Amino acid sequence: MAEATRYIATPAGFLVVLREGDDVFARLDELVGHEAIPAAVICGFGFVRKATFGFFDFQTKQYRPKTITDLDLTNLTGSLA
């Protein structure tokens, strides 16, 4: 059985609720695909149990991933295109 869509339309756009273990990029890709959104601005907040960020090392020209656990995400901003 397919999982129900986990976003709702609001007067200002869409509200997406993420759960522990969700892939943020996959959920956003699902939203823009189903709703045919060509571009958007995103914002969010919440608690993150584990997040991995890729920090770019300009000397080696490679990303160096760093995993951070148990943190408050006070601001998530970006754009989708």
Image (spheres, rainbow, N blue to C red):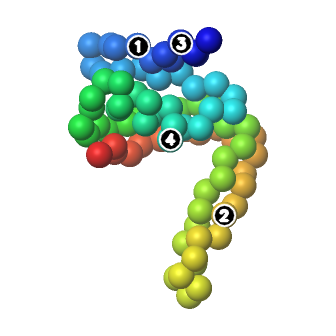
In the image, taking residue 28 as reference, residue 81 lies left or right, namely left
The number of discs equals 4
Tell me the residue that label 4 is attached to: 25
Image mark for residue 8: 1
Q: Are marks 2 and 4 in contact (CB under 8 Å)?
A: no
Mark 3 to mark 2 CA distance (whole Å)? 32 Å
Dot 1 alpha-carbon crowd within 10 angstroms: few under 14, some 14 to 19, many 20 or more: few
Mark 2 to mark 1 CA distance (whole Å)? 33 Å
Dot 4 alpha-carbon crowd within 10 angstroms: few under 14, some 14 to 19, many 20 or more: few
Mark 1 to mark 3 CA distance (whole Å)? 11 Å
Residue 11 in which image quadrant: top left
Image: 56 above or below 76: below
Mark positioned earlier in the residue sequence (3 or 2):
3
Numbered disc in front, either 4 or 3 = 3
Dot 3 alpha-carbon crowd within 10 angstroms: few under 14, some 14 to 19, many 20 or more: few
Amino acid type of the residue tagged 1 in the rendering: Ile
Tell me the residue that label 2 is attached to: 65
Callout 4: SS: helix
Mark positioned earlier in the residue sequence (2 or 4):
4
In front of the other: 76 or 23 = 23
Callout 1: SS: strand
Image mark for residue 30: none
Image: 59 above or below 64: below
Task: State the image coordinates of residue 54 (x, y, percent, origin top left).
Answer: 59, 62
Amino acid type of the residue tagged 2 in the rendering: Pro
Q: Residue at x 56, y 87 (%)?
A: 59
Q: Are marks 4 and 1 in contact (CB under 8 Å)?
A: no
Task: State the image coordinates of residue 56 (x, y, percent, origin top left).
Answer: 55, 72
Amino acid type of the residue tagged 3 in the rendering: Ala
Tell me the residue that label 3 is attached to: 4
Mark positioned earlier in the residue sequence (4 or 1):
1
